[in-house]
Image (spheres, rainbow, N blue to C red):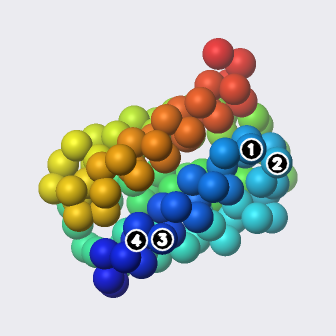
Amino acid sequence: MAENDIGAALDRTTRSLRDGIRQLGIEAAIPVIEGWEERLSALDSPELAAVVENLTALRNHLSADDFDPATMGQLLIALGKQVQVVANGPAGTQAGMERLSRLSILLAREGESLSGR
């Protein structure tokens, strides 16, 4: 996958989270998550495997009947931390450290909001 495709996807994801995850909604969030699962899995990178696992857990939680905002918040906080680690590594240089850092901050902020922090 071309670097520009990842960059454009990061920009779209960041824009969709800017107004808050509650504004995005579950129906809109699931395809975004699935897209990232596919993109990151295709890269076959050990450093991204944990991110893919967390995305899968997040998608599964959103799809479950017993949705818990606090659990989702914890998943988003963990994902935000993982994205920041990626931003500081080799994959971050390729995808754009600034874009990844922005996404990391948004994920953590939304996670904290949902988990009541």
Amino acid on which the number 2 mark rests in the picture: Gln
Q: Which residue is mark 1?
A: 19
Q: Give the quarter of the figure containing the N terminus.
A: bottom left
Q: Along the polypeptide, which appears first: circle 1 or circle 3?
A: 3
> Which residue does the numbered mark 3 point to in the structure image?
8
Q: Say whether marks 1 and 3 touch (CB < 8 Å).
A: no
Residue extending furthest left?
A: 90
The residue shown at (64%, 16%) is 117
From the viewer's perspective, is 42 left or right of 94?
A: right
Q: Position of residue 63 (x, y in %)?
A: 74, 59
Labelled pair 4, 3 in contact (Cβ < 8 Å): yes
- Local secondary structure at mark 1: loop
The answer to whether one can see residue 60 in this image is no
Q: Nearer the viewer, mark 4 or mark 3?
A: 3
Q: Mark 4 or 1 closer to N-term?
A: 4
Callout 2: helix, strand or loop?
A: helix
Disc 1 marks a residue whose amino acid type is Asp
Dot 3 or dot 2, earlier in sequence? 3
> Which of the two discs, 4 and 2, labels the residue nearer the N terminus?
4
- Tag shown at residue 23: 2
Nearer to us: label 2 or label 1? 1
Residue that protrudes farthest toward the top in the picture? 117
- Mark 4 highlights which residue? 6
